[in-house]
Amino acid sequence: SRQFDMSILQATLQAEQALGADLLVPLRKLSKKDATTRLKGIAELAELVRAGDEASGAPDAAALAELLAQFVPLYVRLAADTSRQVREQASRLLGILAPRVGRQLAPHLRALALPWLCAQQDPAADVAAAARAAFEAALPSASKRVDAVFFVRSELFAKASGVIQSTAPPYLKGPNKDAEAEEAAERALSTALD
């Protein structure tokens, strides 16, 4: 058990070193409870990733690959967020990040596939458009998009059936929990079925 804890700690420290404080601070904001803080974190990360096109002090390829690895589990949660703006901006950030990491996206497709495809069916048109644009930016040709979906098809079916059978996300807290939980469950169900 202690050896397992040490390996997790070592992996965390290596990830923090690869990312650097510039990326790590806004990345941590994505886990906060407040939607405003999550939006600020997304905006800061988007600005830093975009800066790769303009400045020499921008994140290098290794840092972007590590950022993607850390962002994927957060995106899964952000794509189901109760805030429409958080869902939209998370997909926009993925649309900026994915083309920059190129083939390094492939190992993460299995985890990203269902939330990313469900986001494309979001009832909020701007969220759906941002998710579709991100998917098309990451996989520019229609054949690549079809291949990607085919590659993760078994995970898609397994996870979609899990969503259909599940109830509201357990991470919802606060005074509007019941209404938010019902809305999130309806959104998850309808996007999984589309």
Image (cartoon, rainbow, N blue to C red):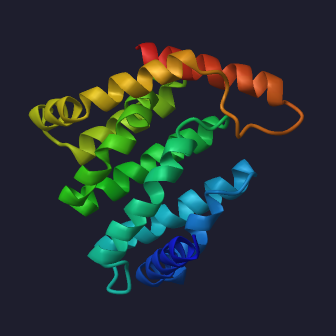
Q: Choose top left, top right, bottom left or bottom right for residue 135.
A: top left
- The residue depicted at 50 percent of the width and 43 percent of the height is 76
- The residue depicted at 56 percent of the width and 44 percent of the height is 78
- The residue depicted at 37 percent of the width and 78 percent of the height is 59
Q: Choose top left, top right, bottom left or bottom right for residue 9.
A: bottom right
In this rendering, would 97 be left or right of 10? left
Which sits in the foreground, 139 or 103?
Answer: 103
In this rendering, would 8 be left or right of 106? right
Residue 18 location, x and y as percent? Answer: 41, 81
In this rendering, would 92 be left or right of 74? left
Task: Point out the residue furthest to the left here.
Answer: 143
Residue 84 location, x and y as percent? Answer: 61, 35
- Residue 3 drawn above or below residue 45: below
Q: Is residue 178 visible?
A: yes
Task: Point out the residue furthest to the right here.
Answer: 175
Residue 172 location, x and y as percent? Answer: 74, 37
Q: Choose top left, top right, bottom left or bottom right for residue 141.
A: top left
Residue 58 location, x and y as percent? Answer: 37, 80
Which sits in the foreground, 136 or 11?
Answer: 11
- Residue 70 drawn above or below residue 85: below
State how many labels appear.
0
Quadrant of the image containing the N terminus: bottom right
- Residue 16 drawn above or below residue 73: below
- The residue depicted at 44 percent of the width and 81 percent of the height is 14
Quadrant of the image containing the C terminus: top left
Q: Is residue 123 visible?
A: no
